[in-house]
Image: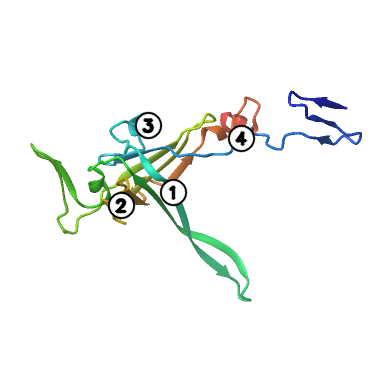
Amino acid sequence: MGTTNSSGVSSGTLPNGMQYAQSVNQNNGQGIRIGGGYLYLMPTTNLESMPDDSEIETPENNVGIIQKGFTIDYKPKVEAIYDQFGDLVSNFVIREDVSVKTGVATWNQNLFSLLSPATTYKTNTDTRTVFTGTNNQLTNVLVRFVQPNPAGDIRFTMVGQGGKGFNLAFDEKALTIDVELESIKYFTNFIAEIRDPGNVLKLGASTPAVQAATN
């Protein structure tokens, strides 16, 4: 028996019980993510635990307009285990490296001291960034990227350092500060996190996991 929707396309159920002309996109597009987002960079000075979202996502930490997208690069280092016959029996991840890349189009001189050992300070007449050429430790930076979506904002978080440097090109194109940061282990058992509120396990009172936790 078939039905006709508003667009005039028929769908229904065959005599053998098989449905036809039904949507194969059961999530109505919610699983597809397109577009950029907002980048926040926050020095980790005196941080002992991960701050709340409201502390990270402030106008002061927002770098402004970003170009070239926001790229997350995850590279595990794997140790392969072979038996006495030369057959691969297991792989162990012995290290995980995460880095991010983007381009900041809004002029923000404070970025230079976040991406290098340089010192940025204000005088009565201007703002100066001084590169001393000394062997100083890089600044630890909490990185937060937010990709807004009606289904729920995706948040990426890590703590990193800008050891890859940066480049500035003053030409006919819009000036962009290329940003690359590599993750460091600043918090216990934490390298990076991707948080998606659209994929939340909703537990009910009869759920075994809840019963086990409350017993």
Residue matched to label 3: 52
Upstream in sequence: badge 1 or badge 2: 1
Callout 3 amino acid? Asp
Upstream in sequence: badge 4 or badge 1: 4
Spatial CA distance of label 2 from label 3 is: 23 Å
Q: Residue at x 26, y 41 (%)?
A: 107
Residue matched to label 2: 162
Numbered circle sitting on residue 71? 1
Callout 2 amino acid? Gly
Numbered circle sitting on residue 112? none
* Whether label 2 touches label 4, CB < 8 Å: no
Upstream in sequence: badge 2 or badge 3: 3
Spatial CA distance of label 1 from label 2 is: 15 Å
SS label for mark 2? loop
Q: Could you say where residue 61 lies in the image, as x and y percent from the top left?
A: 30, 36
Callout 1 amino acid? Thr
Could you tell whether 206 is left or right of 100 in the image?
A: right
Upstream in sequence: badge 2 or badge 4: 4
Q: Which residue is drawn at 58% across and 71% down?
A: 82
Of marks 4 and 3, the one in the foreground: 4
Residue matched to label 4: 29
Q: Could you say where residue 134 lies in the image, as x and y percent from the top left?
A: 16, 58
Spatial CA distance of label 1 from label 3 is: 23 Å
In this orientation, does residue 150 appear? Answer: yes
Q: Could you say where residue 93 lies in the image, as x and y percent from the top left?
A: 50, 59
Could you tell whether 41 is left or right of 192 in the image?
A: left
Of marks 1 and 3, the one in the foreground: 1
Q: Which residue is drawn at 62% across and 24% down?
A: 205
Of marks 2 and 4, the one in the foreground: 4
